[in-house]
Amino acid sequence: MNEDLDKRLESRPTLVAVGGGKGGVGKSVFSILLGQWLARLEKRCVIVDLDLSCANLHTLLGIKDPRMTVKDLISKRVSSLEEIALSTSTENLRVICGASEVLSVANPVFVQKVKLVRSLSSLETDFVILDLGAGTSFNTLDFFLASEKQIVVTTVEPTAIQNAYVFLRNSVFRRLSQLSRRNETLRKLVQQTMNPENSLNLRSVKDLLEVISDLGGERRAAPIRSELARIRPGIVVNKVRDVRELGTASILRHVANKYLLLEVDELGGVAFDRQIEKMVSEMEPLTNCREGGAYESVFEIASKLTAKVSSPRTADVEHSQIGLAS
Ligand SMILES: Nc1ncnc2c1ncn2[C@@H]1O[C@H](COP(=O)(O)OP(=O)(O)O)[C@@H](O)[C@H]1O
Ligand SMILES: [Mg+2]
């Protein structure tokens, strides 16, 4: 690898995706508090509103009518993401506001998404936080999978935990579908596994890998295992009122490991904090939040993220390496 390329790769920002199936669990609030801490730790940071159905990050930042949004980029009024990254009252922290109506109509196809991820990667910054929307649309999953750091936010509510699991499950199957696109046998097996009532009695990704190994040997299964190992989500439990609630992350970790073969990290909890609710309802910018339970608890998570990251993105990996004889 030449020195120039080395330098360029080193100066690329780390993409941190913040997802989780359920709306209202605190993805956007967490994204802002994380950005605040990263900025305070002297990392340059840009938060991007990628909620394609309901872009409202700007509201949490106290911006009623953003001067520029991704709409300006799509309509080619401006030519680069850098121009629509607005400063906030926090030094080192910028925000790119979303425009749900445009993006959902445009419904970016895979190539456009890859382009967008590339431009996000060329932003002059250390971290880009992708604040994703609720649900598990392909758009959301693709942005999640394309990031080096993948965070799933949940609360202790059973419905939030279920949604977080479904989010992880759908991410794994999205990746498997991408990997099996050019291989008929593999594609059929993946589809069977996705159907809970499949005739092959495949109950989990582990079962799927066993069948692949039986049919094609470990030579075929190993590359898929290593691709799945690149999905390494971290769980954040938000609105925690009691430390025992952190057990939620362990449950998710065990289930995801058992059924999806995923290694999940427990990143920590964020305290339930009335001040956050009050600030949101009074439309006070959350960048003014520099103390309190929620803010303090994000410090540890931000510190973990600033530890050096170097793994390549899943999107960069050559898909054709994986194949079963069809
Ligand atoms: N740690 C917290 N403590 C108290 N309330 C919170 C906390 N995090 C989020 N909230 C509340 O939850 C609401 C939804 O959060 P938001 O970040 O918009 O969710 P999401 O982006 O997942 O849809 C916020 O308006 C806020 O009132
Ligand atoms: Mg949100």
Image (cartoon, rainbow, N blue to C red):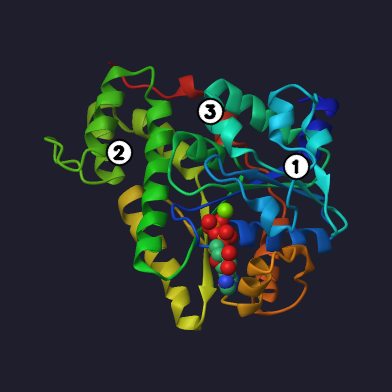
Q: Is residue 107 visible?
A: no
The crowding category of the residue bearing disc 1, from other C-alpha atoms within 10 Å (few below 14, some 14 to 19, many at least 20), is many
Locate ligand 1 by image quadrant: bottom right
Please give left or right for residue 9 compared with residue 219 in the image. right
Residue position for label 2: 209
Q: Quadrant of the N terminus?
A: top right
Mark in the foreground, 3 or 1: 3
Q: SS at mark 1?
A: loop
Which residue type does callout 1 highlight?
A: Pro
Q: Residue at x 68, y 69 (%)?
A: 282
Please name the residue shown 11% across and 35% down the image. Answer: 199
The residue that disc 1 covers is 13
Q: Please tell me which of labels 1 and 2 falls first in the chain.
A: 1
Q: Nearer the viewer, residue 160 or 107?
A: 107
Residue at the far left in the pictured view: 199
Q: CA–CA distance between discs 2 and 3?
A: 37 Å
For marks 2 and 3 on the same chain, the one whose residue lies earlier in the sequence? 3
Residue that carries the numbered disc 3 in the rendered image: 105
